[in-house]
Image (spheres, helix red, strand yellow):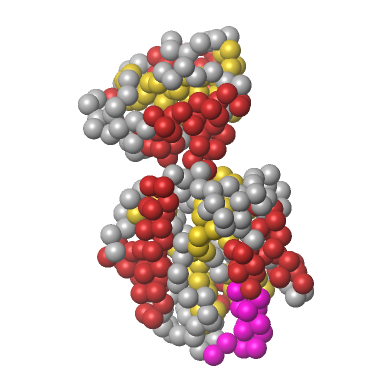
Amino acid sequence: MERMNNKRIEKVIAGMHDLGVSQLLVSAPASVFYLTGKWIQPGERMLAFLVKDNGDTCLFANRLFALTGNVDCPLVEFDDTEDCVAVLAEHLGDGKVGIDKFWPSQFTIRLMEHRNAIRPVVGSAAVDMARLYKDADEIVLMQESSKKNDETILAVIPQLKAGMTEIEGSELYLKEAGARGATGPSFEPLVCFGANCAEPHHCSDRVSVLREGDSVIIDVGLVWKDYCSDMTRTVFLGEPTDEQKRVYDLVKKANAAGRAAVHPGVPVADVDRAARKVIEDAGYGPYFIHRTGHGIGLEVHEYPDISSASPAICKPGMCFSVEPGIYLPGRFGVRIEDLVCVTEDGATVLNAAPRELRVI
């Protein structure tokens, strides 16, 4: 039987108090898992874990998920012949109800129709903030996941060769990750060659072929014991040009500056600033076109953004990426990404794969 995590529920209730809500519907599968220990992928069907500020909880789920006897919390089941929203509405009090930011509107609107005295408000922050600060067990799993990812990317790089397509590089990563026990990728592997490296989220394709002189961006992550990893390394097929070397060195320095800026009490906007300044001072500012990083844990993208617009402050237990890049349209790109975990006196870098320029 999957066990409910009462300490995490207490953290969520504290967040509910901050939001001024006494009842919260948690529906994101990763957040439901975080609190109940059970992964449920509902598809188009309704899933909701109700948390009340007095500590009462209840899971509402379709009988198709076969949860009876498998979850350590009160369970209310329904089937496809029932009005699932009506079943849920009976268990809610009047007034504000926190809902997940991604809960489908079909359920929210129907809930309002069933109960005029209910006022849905976005309540995701109560869970997002709880998930933001990883406990000791979670940090160990994050470290293990990143170590597996390091091992995998280091196994992939020597196998890259001229004539290979991007999708073949991506499939190679999936094969090597599976061989190391990963339950899957944390996102579709991004293996990009040459001019495609100038598109930060170019999807590996079947037509682009690795050629002499190309930069190669390998942005990959895996899932290990439910926790995600994410890293990027850039290598070159054949000797890089002077400009490629210069750009690589700048991104490497920006990555190091971002990591060095991570300390408790530092705004994440300052982490972004530290990495970005290196690139801007060298005249490549217009070619660093995305945020410096993102939170990570049970999902590969979690709160907060590591950007100039983020209000978040570094605190122990936070895990996020530092991934500056320079992208020269039609020519090449370089990105170097590592995960960091904020500690009591600084930060631990979760990736150990070398950052020195590598020629294959």
Q: Position of residue 168 (x, y in %)?
A: 39, 72
Q: Residue at x 54, y 90 (%)?
A: 239
For the point 38% across and 47% down, which residue is it? 137
The residue segment tinted magenta is 239-252
Answer left or right for 166 relative to 261: left
Is 163 one of the magenta-colored residues?
no
Query: Residue 100 location in percent, x, y?
Result: 52, 31
* Residue 322, horizontal then vertical, whole percent: 58, 61
Task: Locate the N terminus by quadrant.
Answer: top left
Main SS of residues in magenta: helix
Residue 92 locus on image (x, y percent): 48, 13
Q: Say if residue 337 shows up in the picture.
A: yes
Quadrant where the C terminus sits is bottom left
Residue at 55% across, 38% down = 129
Name the residue furthest front: 345
Above or below residue 147? Residue 309 is above
Q: Quadrant of residue 254?
A: bottom right
Could you say which is closer to the camera, residue 299 or residue 163?
A: 299
Residue shown at 40% from the left, 37% from the top:
34
Residue 39 quadrant: top left
Q: Quadrant of residue 87?
A: top left
Residue 250 or residue 344, whichever sits in front: 344
Indicate left or right for 191 with 289 as reference. Answer: left
Observer able to see residue 106: no
